[in-house]
Amino acid sequence: MAEQRPNILVIQCDQMAASALSCYGNRVSKTPHIDSLSEDGVVFTSAYCNSPLCAPSRFSMMAGQYPSRIGAYDNGAEFPADIPTFAHYLRANGYRTTLCGKMHFVGGDQMHGFEERLTTDVYPADHGWTPDWSRPEHRFDWWYHNMDSVVDAGHNERANQIDFDDEVGFQAERHVYDIARDKDDRPFCMTVSFTNPHDPYICPKEHWDRYDHDEIDMPRVGHIPYDQCDPHSQRLRHAYKMGEGEMDPEDIRNARHAYYGQISYLDDKIGRILKALDDTGMRENTVIILTADHGDMLGEHGLWFKMSLLEDSARVPFVMNGPGLKSGRVAKPVSLVDLMPTMMDLAGAPQLQDPSDNMDGTSLLPLAKGGDDPDRPAVITEYLGEGAVSPMIMIRDDRYKYIHCPVDPPQLFDLQEDPEELDNLACKAEYASMVEEYRARVREHVDLEELDRSVHASQKRRRIVFEAHMTGKHTPWDYHPPCKAANQYMRNHLDLNDVEACSRICGR
């Protein structure tokens, strides 16, 4: 008898910093269900996104390719429908593929290989969020990432993100039960994608009250005087209207308190999904992968949100739990482009004829099973979105992190000796040869001049298309789940003589 292929459940959070979770050493956050996944699972302690921005990170993750290869430059860039995703590959290899929640697809295709989609998205699918590198001071919308998210942080019973994630959690939980009682015997691959703990930093009072306000930790590295910041950090302060001054410590504590509350709110949702897997008996054959699209600076280095290649923004949680995996911690640097080859490996999907043409990642399964992977390539992360004015490339190997931008001085950090990234070694003569080696690796990765031209040209085209799209009658690309009301519960689709159908619905 052939070995049964595992179900795959991907739980993705939005803007969840690895450093905010107890399984990564945080002593404040309260996440018992995430902790349970990590305790008998595999925790990748040096996992990174491939772009510290929502849409390009997700497109890159789903395609297993770097953002620059697929035109995933920013939150207004289209995700082309002809790029295969893990949903395409698994669906073609006999998996039932379902998306529940946010994926920030931009463009007319709002499925990208998923057979089912249970909710709409939380953000628009057009080019409206396209930055303009030709006008560095330009903001494409007044409300986008400004400091109101921090100074107005606190608890509230209702917010757009709470409304959305309530639906995502409910639909995901119910879908697990639906899978268990329907006649589809295919293994499932379900992606459940929440929008919390993305700013604005607001959580229900129940979750705010789980924390003692005075015990909320403050940033490890607090305010850095503006003239001592690297150029990109200075640009980010202007991008989200922070300015050059120092923030009120109580505003910082409130925002971090609410952020922890958001994480606990998510943990409750995750717990209900895990319970549904337990209730249906499917947990024992399901590999669960918990991750995020990027992190959040949360006041570290005086910065907020994402868009930075510093650790709290670029590093993400990545936990695998399921049959055949060896629990423990893996320090080897990995990234989200590794997710697609890992899922194909789990599913036993046929390998691509030429993986170099379609995948930049490498399967994590050997590491997750307790093996070694000494030849694994370094992590590469790109940033091509707002706040930047030219392509930014990060290379992260076993010990060092190098950040390169043609218009900025290089940055080199020894993360073993300097985990807070305070000592830029690139300006020291004894590291000159190492910096030149990293520069050569950047040139090998991508032609920066050509990439810069491509980003500028793409932004210009999209701004023209968006202006026309919003003139006259507007037809949005948003996904609207089909109404199933006529065939839900005990209504029009039941043959009451069908004992099997009736027993499945009635639970007998």
Image (spheres, rainbow, N blue to C red):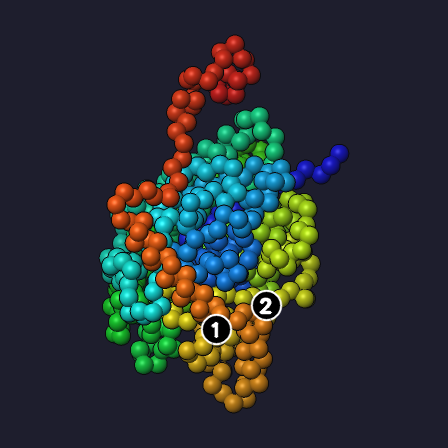
Using the image, determine if residue 356 lies above or below residue 264. Answer: below
Q: Is residue 178 visible?
A: yes
Q: Secondary structure at mark 1?
A: helix
Q: Residue at x 59, y 60 (%)?
A: 360
Query: Where residue 282 sits in the image (x, y, percent)?
Result: 58, 35
- Across the whole image, how many numbered discs are drawn on residues? 2
Classify residue 184 by image quadrant.
top right
Three-letter amino acid code at the position of disc 1: Glu
- The foreground one among 91 and 155 is 91
Q: Residue at x 54, y 66 (%)?
A: 380
Q: Residue at x 36, y 62 (%)?
A: 460
The disc, 1 or 2, on the residue closer to the chain's N-terminal end is 2
Three-letter amino acid code at the position of disc 2: Ala
Using the image, determine if residue 416 lies above or below residue 250. Answer: below
Query: Where residue 118 sits in the image (x, y, percent)?
Result: 44, 37
Q: Is residue 17 visible?
A: no
**Image quarter (top left, top right, bottom left or bottom right) of the N terminus:** top right
Using the image, determine if residue 45 lies above or below residue 489. Answer: below
Mark 2, residue position: 378
Mark 1, residue position: 449
Looking at the image, residue 465 sits to the left or right of residue 5; the answer is left
